[in-house]
Amino acid sequence: MNAIPSTQGSVIVKAAVLVIAALLLFAPFLFQDVRSLEVAARICVFIVLVASYDLLIGYTGIVSFAHTMFFGFGAYGAAIALKQMGPGWDAVALGAVAGMAVSLVVAVAVGLLSLRVKAIFFAMITLATASVALVLASQLSQFTGGEDGITYRSPDIFKTATKLFVDEEGKVVRIFGVRLNGKLAAYYFVFFTSLAMFLFMLRLVGSPIGTVLKAIRENEARAEAIGYRVVAYRTFVFVIAALLASLAGTVYAIWLKYTGPDTTLSFAIMIDILLMVVIGGMGTMWGAVIGAVLMVMAQYYLRDLMGTAAEATANIPLLPEVLNPDRWLFWLGIIFILLVYFFPKGIAGTIAQKGARA
C-alpha cells in the first residue's frame, strides 16, 4: 500500500477531529440517553486533560505523574466552595480561583525545585507529591469528605428542573425531542469551556513558544547553548499545564456534582491519561482528541459490546467464555497492545510519519 501523503494525512486526522467535534456539539440531540451524555461530557473534559498533559510529555519531554493532582485541586476547590457557600456563581468563581492558586504555587515549587534533575528523578518527585495530595484528601475529612467525597449542588441554571425556554402554556420547549432544560445547559457549559481551553493550547503550540518547547524536547543542552533559559521554559509549561488541568477539574466537578479521591486524584486516572496520549500520539493536539475518545468509549462500551458478542456466539464452544464481559480489561489490554504495535507513534503521529515517507 502506498504511504499517505503528508498533506493528505494531516487532512485525514483533522477531518476525524472535526467529525468528533461535531458529534460532541450535537451529542444531546444525537444520543438522547443519560449515559451517552455522561460519556460525551467526560470525553470533553478528558480531551483537555490529555492535551494539557501532552504539553508536558509530548511537546517538552517532561514526564510527570502529578497531573491528576492539579485536576483534583480544581475539582475540590469548586466542591468545597459550592458546599460551603451554596450553588452560586460566586462559589464557582472562588473555587476555580482557589484551585488555580494552589495549583500555581505547587507547580512553581515543584518546577523550580525539580526540573533541574534527571527525568526519572523528576517523575518520582511528582509521583510522591501526587501521593501526598491523595492521602491528604482522604484524611482531611472535615474539608474534603475523606474517602466518601463531597456532594453539593451546582448553580440553579444547571438543575434538570430548570426550564431554559418555555412555550405559551408554560411547558419547556423541545427541539428534536430534547428538552431545553438545565441538564442541556450544563452539558454545553462543559463543551464550550473545554473547547476554549483546547483552542488556547492549539494556539500555544503553534506559537514561537511551541517551537522552543519542541527544541527543548529534542536536545535540551543545545537549546540552552543557543540562549534559551530551559528551566524557565520548562517551569512555564509545567505551570500552564497545571492551571489547565485545574480548570478542567472545576468544570468536571460542576458537571458531576460530586468530588472524591476516586474521581479526581486516583492514580488510575493518571494511567488513563498516559494511555490516551500514547494511543492518540505524543506531540500532537489532534492525537489527544482521538486518544481520549477511543479510551473513554472503550471504558464505557467495551463491556456491553462483549456481552452482545458472547450472546451472539453462545452456540460456539469456548468463544462465549472468552468474550465474557468480566474479561473486558483483558481485551482492553489486547487492543492497546495492537494499537501500539500498528501505530507506534500513536494514531495521529503514525499517519503523519507515513505521510512524511511518501
Image (cartoon, rainbow, N blue to C red):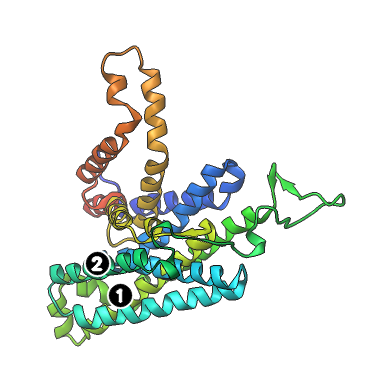
Residue 80 position, x and y percent, is: 49, 70
- Does 246 sit left or right of 134 as displayed? right
Residue 218: which disc? none
Residue 267 position, x and y percent, is: 29, 57
SS class of the residue under badge 2? Answer: loop
SS class of the residue under badge 1? Answer: helix
Distance from Cα at disc 1 to Cα at disc 2: 9 Å
Q: What residue is shown at x 63% (from left), y 58% (from top)?
A: 185
Residue found farthest to the bottom = 227
Amino acid on which the number 1 mark rests in the picture: Phe
Residue tagged 2: 64
In depth, the one of 26 and 256 nearer the eye is 256
The quarter of the picture where residue 153 lies is: bottom right
In depth, the one of 227 and 337 nearer the eye is 337
Q: What residue is shown at x 37% (from left), y 41% (from top)?
A: 298
| Residue 201 visible in the current orientation | no
